Image: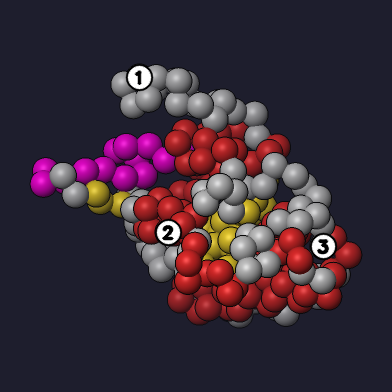
Amino acid sequence: MPTALVIDGHPNPDSLTSAIARSYADGHGDARLLALRDLDFDPHMRFGYRKRIPIEPDLQDARDALHAAERIVIATPMWWASVPALLKGFFDRALLPQQEYRMSPAGLPQGLLTGRRGRMYLLADTPRIALPFVGTPAARQVSRHTMRYCGVRPFPVRRMLGVGAASERQRERWIAEAARTGASDRRRDDLRSGRSAAAEPIATTPAAAGSPR
C-alpha cells in the first residue's frame, strides 16, 4: 500500500493543479494519485446528516486509502474563495462522524485520523500583492477546518498565486518544486517510520503545465 495519498481536486485533468499533483506523486515515488473527477460517487449530502446514503465502491476505496496513508496531500484551485464543488462534495461524503472525527462530551471535535501528516497546494489567480486584503480562505477551510479537524497535522499550505498571469517558465518551476517536495517528504516519512531512505526520483518533465489553475 502506498504511504502517501495525493488528492487531485480539479475537475480538469489538463489543469496546472493536476500537473502539480502528478509531479508531487512522481517525486514522492510511493504515492497513490487519486483524481476525484475519475471517481463514481454522488457528491451531494441529499439528507444532510439526518440520514446517510450508501457509500459507493469508489468512495469506499478512497476512504480506505485515506486511512492507510501516512501522508495526505491535497491539490486544489481556489474558486469563489473556496474549493471546487467536487472536492467539497468529497469531504462531505468521505469524512464521516464517528469514523474520521467525533465530538467530545463537551462538544469539542476530536480527529480520528491522527498520526498522519499532510500538505496542501492551493492555486489561485489572486496576485500576491492582494493577499493582505483578500487572503486565501480556502486554505484555512481545508487545512484547519477539514484536515486538522480530522486529526491530520501538521498540514502546511503552499500557495501558488497569480496563476492566470504566470509565464510558462514559472509554471514549470512550480511543477519541478512539487516533485522536489514530494521526494523530500518521502525521505522524512521514511526516516520517521524507520524505513530505508527512498531512491532519488526521476526528474518530472514540465511538459504538462496545463491550463490556468
For label 3, the crowd category at 10 Å Cα-Cα, with few meaning under 14, some 14 to 19 and many 20 or more, is: many
Q: Which residue is mark 2?
A: 140
Q: To which quarter of the image does residue 122 belong?
A: bottom right
Specify the color scheme.
secondary structure
Q: Residue at x 46, y 76 (%)?
A: 192
Between 191 and 44, which is closer to the camera in this rendering? 44
Residue 39 in view, yes or no: yes
Magenta segment, which residues?
94-106
Q: Is residue 149 left or right of residue 180?
A: left
Cα–Cα gap, marks 1 and 3: 42 Å
Contact, mark 3 vs mark 2 (Cβ under 8 Å) = no
Say if 20 sits above or below 99 in the image. below
Give the quarter of the figure containing the C terminus.
bottom right
Q: Which residue is mark 3?
A: 209
Residue 11 at x, y = what percent?
70, 42
For label 2, the crowd category at 10 Å Cα-Cα, with few meaning under 14, some 14 to 19 and many 20 or more, is: some
Which one is earlier in the sequence, the residue at label 1 or at label 3?
Answer: 1
